[in-house]
Amino acid sequence: MHEKQDVARQRFDVADAAPLLLDAQGVVTSWTRDAQRLLEYTATEVVGTRVTGLLSAEDAARVPELGERCRRNGGWAGLLTAVRKDGRPVRVMVRITPAMEPGGAPHWLVLLCDMSGARGWDMSRAVLEQMVTDSPVGIAIVDTDLRCVWSNAALERFGGGSPGERLGRRLAEIQPGVDAEGIEAQMRRVLGTGRPVVGYEHVGRVRSAPLRETAHMMSFTRLDDDQGHPMGVYYTVVDITDRHRARQRLALLDRAGEQIGRTLDIVRTAQELADVAVQDFADFVCVDLLDSVLRGAEPEPEPPYGTGGVPLRRAGHQSVDPGVPEAVVGIGQVAAYLVGSPPVHCLATGSSWREERLDPLGEEWAADLPGGHRATFLELGLHSVMVVPVRARGVTLGVTSFFRRRRQEPFDADDLSLAEDLVSRAAVCVDNARRYTRERDAALVLQRSLLPRRLPEQDAVEVAACYRPADELTGLGGDWYDLIPLSGARVALVVGEVPGHGIDAAAAMGRLRTAVRTLAALDLPPEEVLAHLDVVARTVREEEQRPSAAQAVDARAVGPGCVYVVYDPVDGQCTMAAADHPAPVVVLPDSTVVRVDVPQGPPLGVGGPPFESVELALAEGSTLALHTDGLLAHRDGGGTDDTDRDRLRTALARPASSLDRRCRAVVDALVPDRPRDDVVLLMARTRLLGAGRVADWDLPADPAMVADARKEAVRQLDEWGLEELAFTTELIVSELVTNAMRHAQGPIQLRLIRNRSLICEVSDGGATAPHLRHPRTTDEGGRGLLLVSQFTERWGTRFVPAGKVIWAEQNLMEPPA
């Protein structure tokens, strides 16, 4: 309630006013009882005297000015200090209005209202002047033409001269170079609307610090006269340079956190550091790293000092000018910094270095530059520099150099602190990228040793493969594929999967793949290969660290999967077996897609029922599609359903210009760029060896038929144009057929196959494999297989349901140059 009354009293209330009348010369012509009650003078004592006698000396001196304003504006209102009869001052609100008598001289009606009880108005004018004059905040007043009419001493610190030098001048005249247009736009806005502007920030340079960017916060308020007309603008200025620079630092560091280290590429990370630092901080930045760091290796404990300097490789640089004209070496080139130069000093000591003013005639610190030219700092336009070592985990990886060219302000201690913060953040990213490069290189070496770099050439099938790992960082997973040439022109197609991703899964996959190739060399049927592979997988699991009880339950249900397919191009027969793995899909020559019903065995290494195989005949031109379950996994990570299989059929049925493109198109259609699981697709289009490339003879168990067998073989070689192989082939046929007749039983068959090699096969009903031995000099026999091994590329035995087949191959391809 009291606060509301105080506010009300601050307003001029005619009912509480004490009126009096003045003539044109300021003489009191009429005095009222209210005026007498307020100032305690009687009418006799006041009438006929000048009004200046009723005011304090200070305000009495203002009467001529106030009279002029009353004549110009038709009145005036404001605060004055009157003096009572007993000499006590009283603060009064005064309103002066014209009072014209008919036919008489002009008079002025003066209304006085006691303001001595109003809060704040008992403060003396001296105190008020002291508040604005001695305030640490810069304060100024401009008129409606935006010319300075008053300013305090504090404003001088912001440039522009003393208060006296400012009077009557516009801001552009007072402080050339500041954004006078922007600031005066705010003043005009306040003059026009009457609404104050608070917190306007101005960033620029002042005369007192022309090389240093400063920031000020300004507030503007309109000043009105007693009639409510705008008189000018009152504004304040506060220096917020430190806060502005701190905000810039935080913004730069935030930007560095967002933009540096977005990849695990060392060169790109170094370039990101240079790109961020050039924005609003430096004019030219270069990042030079040790060559060992770029290779992913551990940095040398001591910099490699040489006669030509210390070699560092430019990993990134950036400039405010297009084309980076300051750079004397390109990205990837070597700059051998001179021994004793600041970069080498920072590299050796791990401490930063700053030079506010470079010697203009000083030369760049690098030696052995392209073209042999070393430019001076004056030629490069560089005048201030900081060199900060790139250190992470206590190891120096290189140096980052910051230069200023356009900005005339030299680097100061705060700038060096900011640069060190910036580089330290980037150094962790560079070191992470270095470590990743090392691990990735190791993973890639492992990958090259595990996955086939190129499938072997053969005539049984045309093949294409596509591998897409879920671990995009290492590019390595637990899925694998392989094509293994077998005897008799046959091939084995293998696709397998080890649970998990990364190097651990890849290492387990490598052991299984090696085991598969070893078992394939034994020419075992698919179901027996998986049975032996199950033993290998079980051994691998036992050698690994024992999991916890909960993990063991889950691990028992999840093991490696594999599908093993053997295709014979002589008769088009295909035999396959699977261990907890998706069954192959066959695309017939008419593009019909058929899924093979393969009996599913248990995962490898977990035990279970025996594996079974299925056999089918494939027409020439049929395409086998072997894949891991990642190809059909739901996009939400679930299992496989009929919809996924339909999608696979649709993708496989689409034509393509080549098998390789068809393979990749299927993977692209079914698998996202970043799959949840590793994906392998192996496609094999079948071929058949025509009747003109295969010849066979059934031989009775009569030793006299050995000579006939030799003759038939030589005759067939003549038809094939292989006369030069007649002698060795006669020897091979003679020894193999003789051994079969002597040691085996059942029907005997001789078969010659012309493929990339000449294959000679002799089958019989025996179940005992022959053994190569070295006979003594006195032995009369036992040299047959020894001779066969000497004259052939390779030989061996495979077992079939009716017995066994002994085979030998002679290479028909030209040896590599």
Image: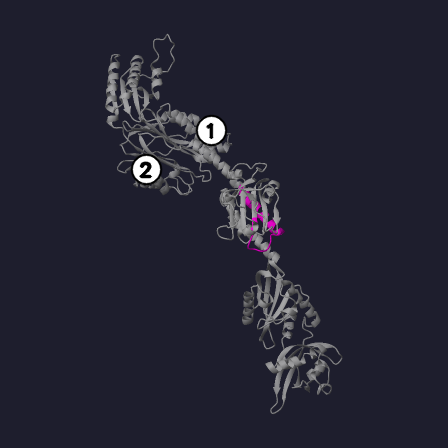
**Which is more toward the observer, 555 or 380?**
380
- Indicate the quadrant containing the C terminus: top left, top right, bottom left or bottom right: top left
Relative to 602, is 165 above or below? below
Q: Position of residue 744 (x, y in %)?
A: 31, 14
Q: Name the residue under label 2.
A: 659
Q: Is residue 516 left or right of 180 when viewed as pictured? A: left
Give left or right: position of 556 versus 208. left
Of callouts 1 and 2, the N-terminal one: 1
Q: Which mark is residue 281?
A: none
Residue furthest bottom as drawn: 103
Q: Relative to 32, is 525 on the left or the right?
A: left
Toward which corner of the image does residue 71 lie, by quadrant? bottom right
Residue 701 lies, in percent from the top left, at: 26, 14
Residue type, numbered disc 2: Leu
In the image, what residue occupies the spot 41% across and 30% down? 603
Q: Name the residue under label 1.
A: 541
**Circle 1/circle 2 CB separation < 8 Å:** no
Q: Neighbour class for label 1 at 10 Å: few (<14), some, many (≥20)? A: some
Q: What amino acid is labelled 1 in the image? A: Arg
Q: Does the magenta stretch include residue 172?
A: no
What segment is highlighted magenta in the picture? 402-430
Q: Which of 343 and 738 is in front in this view?
A: 343
Question: Was residue 409 drawn as part of the magenta stretch in this picture?
Answer: yes
Which quadrant is the N terminus positioned in? bottom right
**Within the image, what quadrant is residue 161 found in?**
bottom right
Q: Please, is residue 492 above or below residue 172 in the view?
A: above
* Residue 616 pos. (x, y %): 29, 29
For residue 154, what is the image quadrant? bottom right
Is residue 559 visible to us here?
Answer: no
